[in-house]
Image: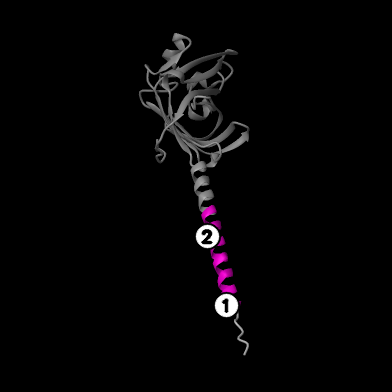
Amino acid sequence: AVVEISTEPRLHSSLNQCSMNFMRHILLLLCVLLSGYAKESSAASHEIIRGESFLNYYVTVNGASTNGSFTDYTMDINFAPSVPEESYVTGEVRLSRKTITALYDEVAKGIVTSDWLDVDKYPKATFNFKNFELSTPNNYKGHGTLTLLGKTLPIECSLILNTRQDGTVVADATVLVDRIEYGIGRGEWEETSTIHNIVTVHAHLITRPTASKTPPKQY
């Protein structure tokens, strides 16, 4: 008698085992790729190297540019060039007679008075930028708000980022502030032919990544 042995169940079992092994490898590969992407896309926290950084302002007076600086400020910077939409920059500038400098003494004395920044009543300015988008290589545009003299208005920030060989990041951020919209320069100073209404605020920041990432501070 001839005994027939069916190999079909064994073949199906082998095929099922191969399929399961294949799926395990695919899932493992996906997990590795996704975890790497998550790590890549997380915005990194940066701290400012104070001795190499500054926060200046520029304004046109009688057709000539003059400038000064804000010496007391804090910023919370979390930025990832690969995913700028996850990045944010928030901060606070403390305003007083000691923390605002100017090229000319008369400007330094006048800018803190009630007609201008009114530092006794409004001793700080705060800003929050997020939703950054890439405009050209290394150039980003952020959207946010600036609170100054008790007014909070929408504002945009232009940001240029460059990474140095030592791992530090050079960040140049520029904001155009319309002083008339904030009520800076009251009375006779509201007229803009002598002192232009647009004040350019420029931050040149040298930063280095930090190990920790924290939620953005609310200023």
The residue range painted magenta reads: 7-29
Q: Which residue is depicted at the point 63% across and 87% down? A: 2
Q: Earlier in the sequence, mark 1 or mark 2?
A: 1
Q: Which element is circle 1 on?
A: helix
Residue type indicated by callout 2: Arg
Q: Which mark is residue 9?
A: 1
Q: Residue at x 48, y 16 (%)?
A: 68
Which residue is at the far top?
105
- Asked whether the beta carbons under mark 1 and mark 2 sit within 8 Å of each other, the answer is no
Residue indicated by mark 2: 24
Q: What is the number of the mark on residue 68?
A: none
Image quadrant in which the N terminus is located:
bottom right
Provide residue 173's location: percent of width, then percent of height.
Answer: 53, 27
For residue 26: magenta? Answer: yes
Front one among 54 and 184: 54
For the image, the number of numbered tags is 2
In this view, the mark in front (1 or 2):
1
Return the residue nearer the eye: 79 or 100.
Answer: 79
SS majority, magenta: helix
Residue type, numbered disc 1: Pro
Residue 119: percent from the left, percent from the top?
Answer: 38, 23
**Quarter the C terminus occupies:** top left
In the depicted structure, whether residue 25 falls above or below residue 71: below
